[in-house]
Amino acid sequence: MQKHLYAFFLFLFPALAQAQVTPNVSSWVVNTTGATGYNGILSNVQRVQYSAGNVYVTCTGIPSYTIGPWPNNPNTATNQNFVFKITRTPQPNPGTPTATPLGHTGLWSNGVSIFNAKDAMSYNNQGVWNQNAIVVEGPSFDSCLGHPAGNGEYHHHLNPRCLYNDHDSSRHSPIIGFAFDGYPIYGAYGYANASTPGALKSMRSSYRARSITQRTTLPDGTALPANQYGPAISTVRPLGYYIEDFEYVAGRGDLDSHNGRWCVTPEYPGGTYAYFVTLNRLYEGAYPYTPGPTYYGLVPAGATGPTSGHATVTEPVTTYVVTAAFEAAGQQLRVYPNPASTTLTIALEGGLTNTLRASLFNALGQSVGTAADVHPSVPHQFDLSRLAAGVYFLRVAGPGTSITEKIIVTR
């Protein structure tokens, strides 16, 4: 008996070793096959390392999907050799919110940079009326709505539509990135009720275009001196050409002034602050598009600015290991919610075999009598109501395939 129990713990070791794995560690699209993207550059994320307080993401900034061409944009996407340091313990900012900066403001889950709505240019270079990159630079976006900056950094100012299915209204959108304050960024769809899983809806921005014909005041109503007036609304500079053409109206939509809200999600059943990308009814970007114009949380020193993206690992870390058997052919296993109380859902996607068996074991390696045959594209639910609160391990196995996930049951 001791021999068999020891063997089972060897089998469980990878899961136990990753006991601290949370969505900010496991949500990255890690390249496990050496696949390349634009111009033969390694694509997506190359490595994820984590400590109790931080996650380090090594990436090139090049996605696996096809990018380019970029009309009238002379820049070329290049390998950025990034290492981003993102806090795993995000905290709300009780003071003055930090503005999202020019350059990267966060990181999409495939290691591509997130930029805010600004394009670094303003009317008469005064920094008062700041150009909206989606309007001004939009003609240079490729079919995935991205383009390279002058330094070769490929980025998206708005919804990265080639990263996930932004038309899928049948399920909560996945985590598609993290802002530099450490909070997750989801796709367009979330739960209609922020506190309860259930019906879904496309998250609406609480910003709207201002009802103005002259640019003489700021969105908060501040009257400007004549030498800071912007150009009149016209066909050359239409409403929306500048980000100051938008105003925030609390409660108008689903999201707050940072383009996020506190809510439950599949990955955070107990609730988290989360940002969402925002779209209109035509699936076009809606201001402010991504997190911003300010962060909800505290932004750690060095997360933005000249050192951002060039972090040095100076603390003990664990390298996150993606289970190759499930990732090699674009396959995915999702288990949610976790922690769970009454029901656990297993969702298998991709080219998985149909001969898979899912089983639950307690921390002693003993079967708890909960097992089922599971199949790709057919979510399966385990009834956990008779189990005591505690730590369990889910094993999904079949010919040439085996994966173990730690499950926490709460009461």
Image: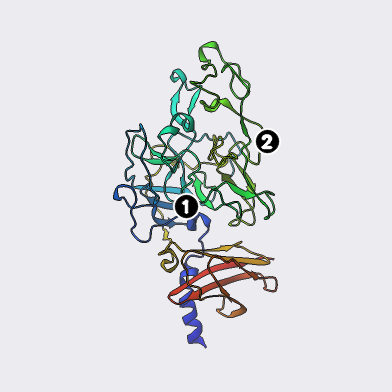
Q: Position of residue 103 (x, y in %)?
A: 42, 36
Look at label 1 and name its amino acid. Asn
Front position among marks 1 and 2: 2
Q: In the drawing, what numbered circle is on residue 252?
A: 2
Count numbered badges in the picture. Answer: 2
- Which residue is nearer to you in this view: 130 or 18? 130
Q: Is residue 280 left or right of residue 144?
A: right
Look at label 2 and name its amino acid. Arg
Query: Which residue of the protein is positioned furthest toward the bottom in this rendering?
Result: 1
Q: Is residue 60 left or right of residue 300?
A: left
Tell me the residue at 48%/76% (across/down). 398
Tell me the residue at 49%/53% (across/down). 53
Tell me the residue at 57%/46% (across/down). 188
Q: Position of residue 352 (x, y in %)?
A: 47, 69
Q: In the drawing, what numbered circle is on residue 399?
A: none
- Which residue is nearer to you in this view: 67 or 385? 67
